Amino acid sequence: MTNDDTHRDNNRETSDHELSESEYITTVSTPNLVRTIASLLLGGAVGVMGFAIAPLLKVILLIVLAGAGLLFITIHPYRRDVNAAYMNRYGEYRTTVRRLIPLFPDWLALMILPVIPMQGTFLGIIAFVVASVYNYLVFPWIDGTAYTQEPDNP
């Protein structure tokens, strides 16, 4: 038994014996393409709120871009491994407050940007860039892969 097996075995149920040892996944990394595209889509959803366009168009673009970003994360095949690793570690898959906290700055920007009086292309681009970089940096916490990583051993 390797060190990788020790942590996941602590939470393993006795009914899990039907899975072979190779089917237990402990750590998963987000594919870089998924991380980049989803971050750009979520950043675009935030950035569109800074542009000087009709409010209805802003809402439509926000829903389409945010929906596309979340859908892209959800339908990618790596999610199967993330779910399996999360289940192996924690026993069940639940959305918790700590998984939603990384999205709070995006939500805050979505609430503040529409009321800023100097809306225009510059504000929209700045909001897009800042939100995209932020989402890229915190993406492992957004998609849950950070919670599947093995703790560092001193």
Image (spheres, grey):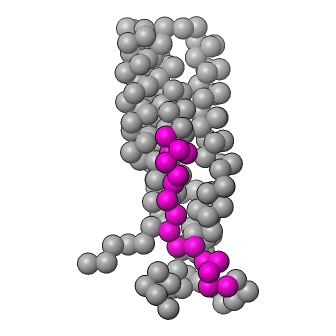
Which residue is pictured at 43% across the width and 33% down the height? 132
Left/right placement of residue 19 relative to residue 101 reads right
> Where residue 150 sits: x, y (%)?
42, 72
Residue 58 counted in the magenta span: no
Left/right placement of residue 87 relative to residue 47 reads right
> Where residue 93 sits: x, y (%)?
62, 64
Which residue is pictured at 39% across the width and 27% down the height? 129
Which residue is pictured at 49% across the width and 59% down the height? 29
Q: Is residue 29 visible?
A: yes
> Where residue 7 sits: x, y (%)?
47, 81
In the picture, the quarter occupied by the C terminus is bottom left
Foreground pick, 29 / 64:
29
Quadrant of the rendered structure where residue 109 is? top left
Which residue is pictured at 47% across the width and 23% down the height? 47
Residue 28 counted in the magenta span: yes
Q: What stretch is highlighted in magenta?
A: 20-36
Decide: is 22 above or below 139: below
Quadrant of the rendered structure where residue 34 is? top right
Q: Is residue 108 visible?
A: no
Left/right placement of residue 62 relative to residue 46 reads right
